Image (spheres, grey):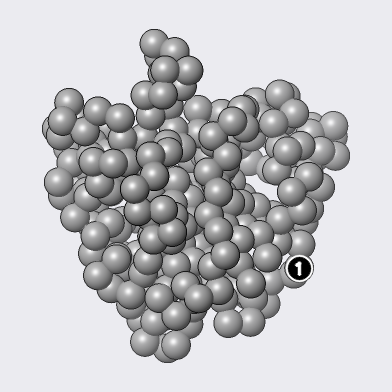
Amino acid sequence: MKIITWNVNGIRAALGRNALDWAFEQNPHALCLQEVKAWPQQLNEDQVGMLKLPFVWNAAQRPGYSGVTTFYKDQPDEITMGMDAPQFDGEGRVIQTVWADLRLFNIYFPNGQRGQERVEYKLEFYAHLLELCNMLHQKGEGIIITGDFNTAHMPIDLKNPKANEKTSGFLPEEREWVQKFLDSGFVDVYRHLYPDKVQYTWWTYRLNARAHGIGWRLDYFLVSEALVPRVKDVIIHENVMGSDHCPVELVLD
């Protein structure tokens, strides 16, 4: 079973570059895209024809902003848009899909770089999500949270941690919330498998950062502890182009 996550930074642009061909060729059970920046009705006939799997789409109310899409091989038993939180759900950031004993969250977490107000919004988003996940864990559900977390958890997860200590994405309060998930029954399975490996999933378009290896690991799979024995690998496909992020793949039994 494969699950792939990818912030495509605009699905219409990604389709225009044929970037999603690679993802569909992997034959994933689920493909989770973030920052699609479109409503599905904005895709033309040719673009729709390039989508090789059924999908569910949660677009932001604001045109050209945010949005997530989950493609799936098998029809989910349950689909939920958002988190039943009006303050967040209008931005089209969350899709939940359930297959049997597995709940998959496809999430585009808020970016806090537009000021302190958005940092606070981001932290409130983390808090609401964790509260929801705690309730689901209490019911015995197995959960996978994937997507663009917009936070690098530890210094190993970005090239220049010292220089970014006061930058949103590496603020202590943001990193603390990622840790709270790990203290509440989740495992960052990439870091679990590769505790000392340095790889990134996002590079700014400025200063040829990707070619120079100046990046951040922002795209994660957090997996319920009970599901960790099923995890076979997590692969960061840093050589797959098409966005300022690269795709990340989770392989499960």
Name the foreground residue: 178 vs 230: 230
Name the foreground residue: 103 vs 186: 186
Q: Position of residue 5 (x, y in %)?
A: 56, 49
Residue depicted at x 24% and y 60%: 179
**Is disc 1 placed on a helix, strand or loop?**
loop
Is residue 138 positioned above or below 159 on the image? below
Q: Is residue 69 in view?
A: yes
**Residue underneath mark 1:** 74
Q: State which quadrant residue 150 falls in.
A: top left
The count of marks equals 1
Name the amino acid type tagged 1.
Asp
Name the foreground residue: 133 vs 250: 250
Q: Position of residue 85 (x, y in %)?
A: 38, 63
Residue depicted at x 39% and y 11%: 207
Residue depicted at x 63% and y 41%: 39
Q: Position of residue 126 (x, y in %)?
A: 29, 58
